[in-house]
Amino acid sequence: MSFGWRAILCLYMVALGPASAEDKWSDDFSASELNRGLWCPCQINMKRAPIEFLHDPDNPGNQFARITVDGNSLGGNVCRKAAPDDECGTPISAFSQPPEQPRAVEERDTPKLHGPSLIDDPKIVPVAAIDSNGDPYCDSAIIQKAIAAGEEGRCIQRQELRFQSQYAHAADEPFTYKLRFRMPAIIQDTKNSVRWVTAQWKEEPISPAYNDPSPVLAQRFDDGVLHVTVQDEDCRCRVASASMPDGSIWPAKPGIARDCISTRPGDPDNTACTADLTVEYGANPVLPSARGAWVDMEYRVQMSRSKPAAIEIYADGRFIARVSGKIGYEPAPGKISLTKFKIGHYRDYLPSVDAMDIDRVEVERSE
């Protein structure tokens, strides 16, 4: 082989990237800027609340990423992928799609809304059309600001990183995700259960019969309490939790998932529902608190309604829970559902400035 062809082959292998390298990729955020070959920051306000890269004073030589949520993210962040406003970019060329890897399908990140579109013409949307989701801080003035932001037009705050689309994988194939992160030590609201998602695994494309589906697996921080939920279609079940703000322990009972609520858009009261999910627990299934402390979470993720599927949860090396059953949603007709991962803040509006520190993210195909 000539030197020229060797050089071309090397360039090809580099461009192919970690998604094809034994189906394993990671980031320890040790660089001075975001690795855009791996991450798309389209739902981060990179102008007014950009990602920071900070040195850890408690661990010399270590660096982490800080994602801050504040008033600049009110109204959400639409992911713009069309030219000339492409916020993801194309860091890897078209020929480098990993072999045997289904090409990701990009969806609209703007949730389906009832009533007029808030994105097409946000100024004409009446305040009454905005769903506050029971958020006590979402008053008319905040709603007007959310609309005026010209993004998702909802009373939410979003500061999320997502993988570039070539790192999507078939939802029914098992992959292990390892996350090392910490949340703020002081939380303004610990009583109103204001929605606060810190990592989410979505499944797409899914059947158009579902309206505004929730993430299949979500790592949450409502009330400053780290907890995990899993979806069986429109039935969401809490399957693991840290201690409550008052110090009480969430009851982790094995068997059929019990702490379940409806997430159907037509059910604003979130009535109780029964999911086809079974949970097994470890000897000590209480999650650690992430408030002001580093936590290592590990998830083995496999979603399906027609094949064996399970989600396993570990925290700081301890086995917490294994959820099995009908996990997720029916795929779109004739399509393969893919798993899309995001990390950062997605919450209903809170009038506080809060930072999530992320030290490491690792993903690897599982057995």
Image (cartoon, rainbow, N blue to C red):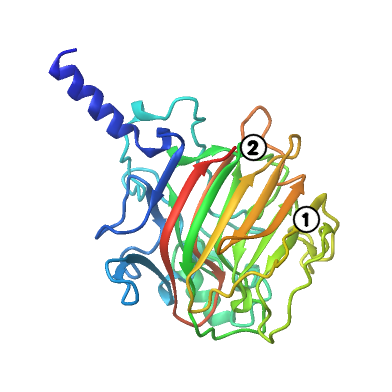
In the displayed structure, would residue 55 be above or below residue 248?
Answer: above
Residues under labels 2 and 1: Cα distance? 19 Å
Residue 11 lies left or right of residue 151; in this view the side is left
**Front position among marks 2 and 1:** 1
* Three-letter amino acid code of the residue under disc 1: Val
Which image quadrant is residue 253 in?
bottom right
Work out whether residue 313 or residue 43 is closer to the camera in this orientation and state it. Answer: 313
* Three-letter amino acid code of the residue under disc 2: Asp
Which badge, 2 or 1, comes first in the chain's sequence?
2
Residue 206 lies left or right of residue 156; in this view the side is right
The residue at which mark 1 appears reads as 279
Residue 81 lies left or right of residue 278; in this view the side is left
Residue 25 percent across, percent down from the top left: 41, 44
In the displayed structure, would residue 168 be above or below residue 63?
Answer: above
Q: Which residue sits furthest front?
A: 283
Residue 129 percent across, percent down from the top left: 64, 67
Q: Which residue sits furthest left?
A: 3
The secondary element bearing badge 2 is classed as loop
Quadrant position of the N terminus in the picture: top left
The answer to whether residue 164 shows anywhere in this view is no
Quadrant position of the C terminus in the picture: top right
Q: Residues within 10 Å of mark 2 (few under 14, many from 20)?
A: many
Work out whether residue 21 or residue 83 is closer to the camera in this orientation and state it. Answer: 21
The residue at which mark 2 appears reads as 172
In the displayed structure, would residue 274 be above or below residue 133?
Answer: above
Q: Residues within 10 Å of mark 1 (few under 14, many from 20)?
A: many
